[in-house]
Amino acid sequence: MREIGHFIGGEHVAGTSGRTAGVFNPATGEVQAKVSLASVSEIRAAVENAKAAQPKWAATNPQRRARVFFKFVELLNKHMDELAELLSQEHGKTVEDSKGDIVRGLEVCEFVCGIPHLQKGEFTEGAGPAIDMYSMRQPVGIGAGITPFNFPAMIPMWMFAPAIACGNAFILKPSERDPSVPLRLAELMIEAGLPAGILNVVNGDKAAVDAILTDPDIGAVTFVGSTPIARYVYGTAAMNGKRAQCFGGAKNHMIIMPDADMDQAVNALMGAGYGSAGERCMAISVAVPVGEETANLLVEKLAPKIESLRIGPYTDDKADMGPVVTKEAHARINGLIDRGVEEGAKLVVDGRGFKLQGYENGYFVGGTLFDHVTPEMDIYKTEIFGPVLSVVRAKNYEDALSLPMKHEYGNGVAIYTRDGDAARDFASRVNIGMIGINVPIPVPLAYHSFGGWKASSFGDLNQHGTDSIKFWTKTKTITARWPSGIKDGAEFVMPTMK
Ligand code: NAD
């Protein structure tokens, strides 16, 4: 059985902890490899390598740091097919969808090619008598990133690209479900000219995460995953004196106003609800039609489309979606569909028991649609993270707006309407981080920043965009005066500029 180890100091190294986890093919249920689960000493080895390499990297001028990313982007494009295939093998999503995963990461690498400009400080000449004041953005030192299974290319790149471009060394702890793409990305970074030790990939589970959170040399931690773990990582990192940004789960609503183009709204819901088998933190899992007529029409149009979804392994290039990631996820999603039925929601399309000929042991769940879901139900409150869409019928616009407003999560939300006033009011009032107006999955591009509100995010700076440069640097402000500007004698009062 193939054993997947770590990438430390620019080289592949075998795991030494003696603990491993299976990496499955979600379409067949077969174990295809074993991934090593790191112990404290393996995290420590990565930190030692990072510590040795980081000062020289930080002192490398920003144009040279940028050139590594120019080259890396070229390599990502060159190896796109190979990376997408590798990603789909372990995640299960379609190859086209895997390419999207890689490209949305690549775009952040393109963004950080502008690091000479992005990392510039500020300067004020004559802030006081003969006094100049300036600030510089210096790297934090060693950063670490802990990533979820659902975007094994994009999220690692969202993390390591700005961190490394700013002059930090980085330790990536990917999801143990699909560890191969992050390791390949590290190899390509070396090929692009990154010095050894600046990007280390250490596979593992809670033990590796805890070793990162308590390591005295790691200055900043970025996390993406489920909310309970995001909360834990944020609290533990902060208690250990680290800067932290932690992104959690979601329950994204889409409001469909009576004046919306219904065909556009239905197509949007199909892609946003069922693409990647619903395993996206920006997937739409709740549709909120306004008015009974809108609701009836929506359900009538959605149901046949969901029934005819093409579900298949990643090798089926016509598949709309693949299996879910693990046996446990499969059981959990089916259990939540059972729960919805028990709670009294109307199951319009039932994806339980979906079987694909030749792939009977795969983790496939059919597209599922619930109608008449209410806010008290568990299927409304819980992030299902599968191909299950709930319709919550709203009487009017205010009723619809109040649903995402009162929900625990606040990652993304969308409104479908032709009414500019309604859209503007919605964007202004809703307490959610990312808003789509006739856009179902409003993931901001690399030069804006990504992050939710409420239980979807802990910490005050978002991912990518200029926020990421702030997160990965510390500001130092210098106040300077030269001897010709200094008056004789001691000054005892607080200096002011009056
Ligand atoms: P997860 O929380 O199970 O795992 C995320 C990471 O945490 C993994 O690297 C895992 O090894 C580690 N981990 C798991 N249990 C841990 C523990 N007890 N202590 C310390 N570390 C632990 O999440 P997942 O199932 O891999 O990913 C799906 C979740 O990620 C969903 O909730 C989804 O909404 C969320 N997500 C959020 C965003 C966002 O930007 N907000 C993006 C993608 C995914």
Image (spheres, rainbow, N blue to C red):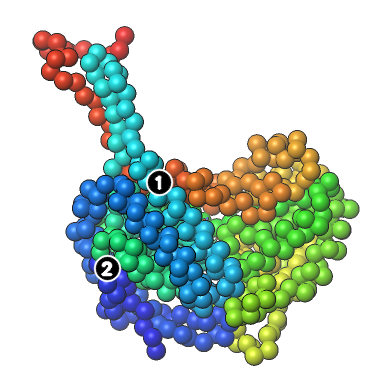
Q: Is residue 291 above or below residue 391?
A: above
Q: Which residue is mark 1?
A: 114
Whether residue 47 appears in this view of the structure is no
* Residue 428 as seen in the image, left or right of residue 36: right
Whether residue 77 appears in this view of the structure is yes
Within-10-Å neighbours for mark 2: few <14, some 14–19, many 20+:
some
Residue drawn where x is 38% and y is 40% of the image: 117
Residue drawn where x is 63% and y is 60% of the image: 283
Circle 1: element type: loop
Residue 276 placed where, x, y %? 61, 68
Within-10-Å neighbours for mark 1: few <14, some 14–19, many 20+:
some
Q: Is residue 436 above or below residue 126?
A: below
Locate the C terminus and report the quarter of the image it occupies: top left
Residue 25 placed where, x, y %? 52, 82
What mark, if any, has residue 10 been given in the picture?
Answer: 2
* Residue 391 as seen in the image, left or right of residue 482: right
Disc 2 marks a residue whose amino acid type is Gly
Locate the N terminus and report the quarter of the image it occupies: bottom left
Ligand 1 contact, mark 2 (Cβ < 8 Å): no
Q: Find the distance from the CA under tag 2 to the CA under tag 1.
A: 25 Å
**Closer to the camera in the image, 221 or 33:** 33
- Counting residues from the N terminus, which is met first, the one under dot 2 or under dot 1? 2
What mark, if any, has residue 462 been given in the picture?
Answer: none
Residue 217 placed where, x, y %? 24, 55
Residue 311 placed where, x, y %? 68, 77
Disc 1 marks a residue whose amino acid type is Gly
**Closer to the camera in the image, 490 or 9:** 9
